[in-house]
Image (cartoon, coloured by chain):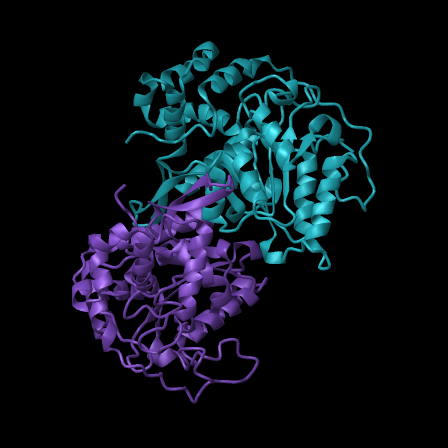
Chain colours: A cyan, B purple
Amino acid sequence: MKPTFPATGLNRRSLLTALALLPAFPHVFGPVSALAQTTTTDPLPAWNDGAPKRAILSFVQATTDRASANFVPAEARVATFDQDGTLWVEHPMYTQVVYCLDRVPAVAAEKPALKRAEPFKTVLSGNRAAIAKLSMRDLETILAVTLSGMSVEQFGSEVKEWLAKARHPRWDRPYTELVYQPMLELMQYLRTNGYRTYIVTGGGQDFVRVYSGDVYGTPPEQVVGTAGGTHYGYDAKGRPLLTKEPRLLLNDNNAGKPEGIHLLIGRRPQAAFGNSTGDRQMLEYTQVGGGARLGMLVLHDDKEREYAYGPAGGLPDTRVGTFSNDLMKEAGSRGWTVISMKSDWKRIFPFEQA
Amino acid sequence: MKPTFPATGLNRRSLLTALALLPAFPHVFGPVSALAQTTTTDPLPAWNDGAPKRAILSFVQATTDRASANFVPAEARVATFDQDGTLWVEHPMYTQVVYCLDRVPAVAAEKPALKRAEPFKTVLSGNRAAIAKLSMRDLETILAVTLSGMSVEQFGSEVKEWLAKARHPRWDRPYTELVYQPMLELMQYLRTNGYRTYIVTGGGQDFVRVYSGDVYGTPPEQVVGTAGGTHYGYDAKGRPLLTKEPRLLLNDNNAGKPEGIHLLIGRRPQAAFGNSTGDRQMLEYTQVGGGARLGMLVLHDDKEREYAYGPAGGLPDTRVGTFSNDLMKEAGSRGWTVISMKSDWKRIFPFEQA
């Protein structure tokens, strides 16, 4: 069967760029903000006072105050969050792609024939230049092989084990620590106000579900992601099990985001948060519902504390998590709020103490 | 595009049987049970005291009492319910199939070419004998045309309108009144004890979501069903919308039930309820999780108050909602509880006053 697992929105050039950049980042910490508020009455202490924070506060007020014309009953309070670049770091490379490359040796140990076959041979060589030249098709083959063929439980164990030891090249910390403190506060604030917070990610649904509860407070049933099929069968002892297949069911990027939201949630979100062109349709779909709707986009404009990429705002076009000029224009015309990491966030990561 | 929407588990012979039976049923009400309990302390008043009721009560006790060895934390309390034949009447014909046949005139009015094309010509003729002879392929064509091509919102309106006026041929009541009172009590009892109740149905996910909240207390995000793809696009005014496609994503029957549960919920249920061979894999998948698990199957053995069909238990083999002898055997070996509608349920429908 031809593997059909997509590279979660990564295009060929982005892979090359990302791989090329991988060894280039110094392991430095972002500066600790001296301005973090500590008052217990502020639900969003890692946010500077500014348009984005005010937009959040007035949206919640408008949709939860029974006297408001835009009051939203509790059952309809749904907020959706992109993950890569919106909730956690996506540079220099999507975390799940790093996982898949890291899995190759283990998969090759189980299936020795792969050691002599491309693109696995190249990945196993450790030759960074050669790895950076892998084609999009090669990458799809790697994703298909490392994300399917095992039981759902085995996959979960493998991801868990990897997350415990893998480190981001720049911060030398587990990937799950590289989450944005302001967004964690936002999710919690929305939940406190009766919202159910969903992750709607181009990343693999099964991958993200492994840690989404611990890291974001979103249980597995509130993760919508790129999903392959599973096959129900029985093991040698007759015990039922679900095996992951390379057959793509949902490519949860671009138009796939509203489609995935409809499939898994069956409701239009009241608020949606993203950071790239892959989130455009999700924000459009959210907004068209009428009443008070909140659409926000994180702009990565903070090279010192995190990364800087666009090309919107004159930032470098790195092709990983692209925020296009068109998206910026649409944000302006539709009234979506653009969050400047540099100006709007006091702290970026939880490990920067307030 | 070849229509691929499945007939929700209906096989050719079942369609013929069901259509043939359609005009034969007298419009009678089941007798009102004189034994209904009215005490407020019984959470399951429509259930007779017996093995099934005791199994439910001890399962809930075992999984919600912190002192129990089989205690289940609140977030993992998931119970899944088949719909047709488990929560509401499925004879003489699955409600959604009746809907699709009833929709043909409206669809043909919009697309006049269909009036001259089979199988639509036959359905429009009103000739019951000819309709009963339609092949499975014909039925798939009818389902594909009546369940796709419109926006998600338009489909919802059409179903709502139909439900308001359609009547079951035997009881002359809306289909949504033909729900089983004991199962409604069971769902409520589980929810009161912290369980989230999901519908996992071979019926169409979008169809069931229209009424699942009002009828069962299950919101759209807790309905897993047979699902086709949607297409995100824009209408003539540039307004985003999702259009239903005939492309099948999930056939939520048999092995498709655990696969659908994994896709939409991402957790193994703690309890599962069904009534036919299409529910077998869901019950197996539930049980293999270990600890206290509850698997129950409704046996339709009450011709007077509802219907009688098997062929398990020597009941007629009607091929709609088949409870096979093999399933009965597996229930025995795995310790699943079989619910006799005749012996275990005091009342069948809410409209029978206690």
Indicate the position of residue A8 as horizontal and vertical percent values.
46, 30
- Is residue B170 found left or right of B74 in the rendered image? left
- Looking at the image, residue B141 sits to the left or right of residue B55; the answer is left
Residue B125 in sight: yes
Residue at left 44%, top 53%? B154
- Residue B127, position in %: x, y? 19, 67
Which image quarter: residue B201? Answer: bottom left
| Quadrant hosting residue B282 | bottom left
* Residue drawn at point x = 51 percent, y = 48 percent: A221
Tell me what residue is drawn at x 41 percent, y 30 percent.
A6
The residue sitting at 55% across, 14% down in the picture is A21
Of the 4 image quadrants, the one containing the N terminus of chain A is: top left
Q: Position of residue A188 (x, y in %)?
A: 67, 45
Give above or below for A80 relative to B273: above
Q: Nearer the viewer, residue A226 or A271?
A: A271
Q: Is residue B164 above or below residue B32?
A: above
Quick one: quadrant of the C terminus of chain A? Answer: top right
Residue extending furthest toward the bottom: B34
Please say whether residue A211 is visible from this viewpoint.
no
Residues B34 and B269: in front is B34
Judging depth in this view, the residue of A260 and A328 nearest the camera is A328
